Amino acid sequence: MADRIERAARTVLRLSVKQPLADGIVADLETIARVSGGVRSDIAKLTGIGSLRGLHNAQNAGAAAAAVLALGVAPDVLQQGLRSFPGLAHRMEQVGRQAGDGGTTLFVNDSKGTNADATAKALSSFDDIFWIAGGKPKSGGIESLAEYFPRIRKAYLIGEAAQEFAATLDGKVPYEISETLDNAVPSATRDAAASGLAEPVVLLSPACASFDQFRNFEIRGTRFRDLVLAQPGVTPMA
């Protein structure tokens, strides 16, 4: 194993999620493939792996695939590993689901989304979002997230940034000033359940630091998780 790791460490392999390669690893939202001499062969599927949603996670999975393939891991073992990956706490963490008459709500804890760039990754990964955002604001606000506003059904604004975010969303995205997570979670849960949508998502991705109401993003995310699991009919993710 040590010899294989040493050889793999000397290997340089190109990775892309944006453009074709003649040689290397390419990934998209559905597939990881190896390209050699312009010939592509699929090596793993990402479809249906909830913990690896989004192009940024496809890039992460592609990098992991390149590393383990260089170590001689078989593609079927790689696929099994990807499917069993539970995700990381507070980073687009799937917390639970709530079945309703119209569909099933997914609750996602992305408390690590402490700025607009990070939150963009989460917003790009879902449709029909009931978005909980706000906290201690950072420079630039959420103006850069405008391209994702059509994905947001309603926003629930908390913390010091609530009024600033409301001004940005006004006339573009329905919102309410929830002030705290304790208010936002039940409101978003209720609205998602009543939406009639097949797969609404209640997403905490604050685009803010936590320090106005929480000591750190982990405590904020844990509070979100606890509030979600306290909602009637929510089943924790296995």
Image (cartoon, grey):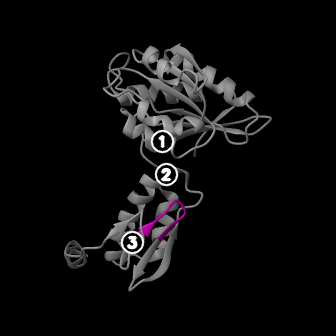
Give percent across and percent down for residue 110.
Answer: 45, 36
- Residue at mark 3: 25
Highlighted magenta segment, given as a residue range:
25-32
Q: Residue at x 25, y 78 (%)?
A: 4
Q: Does residue 102 appear anywhere in the picture?
A: yes
Based on the picture, tell me whether residue 29 belongs to the magenta stretch. yes
Q: Which residue is mark 2?
A: 54
Q: How far apart are the two marked residues, 3 and 1, measured between alpha carbons?
A: 24 Å
Left or right for 31, reference 160: right
Q: For the residue labelled by badge 3, is the local secondary structure a helix, a strand or a loop?
A: strand
The quarter of the image holding the N terminus is bottom left
| Up/down of 171 relative to 203, above or below | above
Q: Which residue is mark 1?
A: 122
Circles 1, 2 touching at the beta carbon (< 8 Å):
yes
- The main secondary structure of the magenta stretch is strand
**Residue 126 appears left or right of 39:** right
Amino acid, disc 2: Gly
Could you tell me residue 22's position as x and y percent? 37, 79
Q: Are marks 3 and 2 in contact (CB under 8 Å)?
A: no
**Residue depicted at 47% across the width and 26% down the height:** 133
The mark nearer the N terminus, 3 or 1, is 3
Q: Quadrant of residue 138?
A: top left
Secondary structure type for disc 2? loop
- Given residues 16 and 103, the one toward you in this image is 16
Q: Is residue 139 above or below residue 151?
A: above
Tell which circle, 1 or 2, labels the residue nearer the N-terminal end.
2
- Residue 20 coordinates in the image, percent (x, y): 42, 72
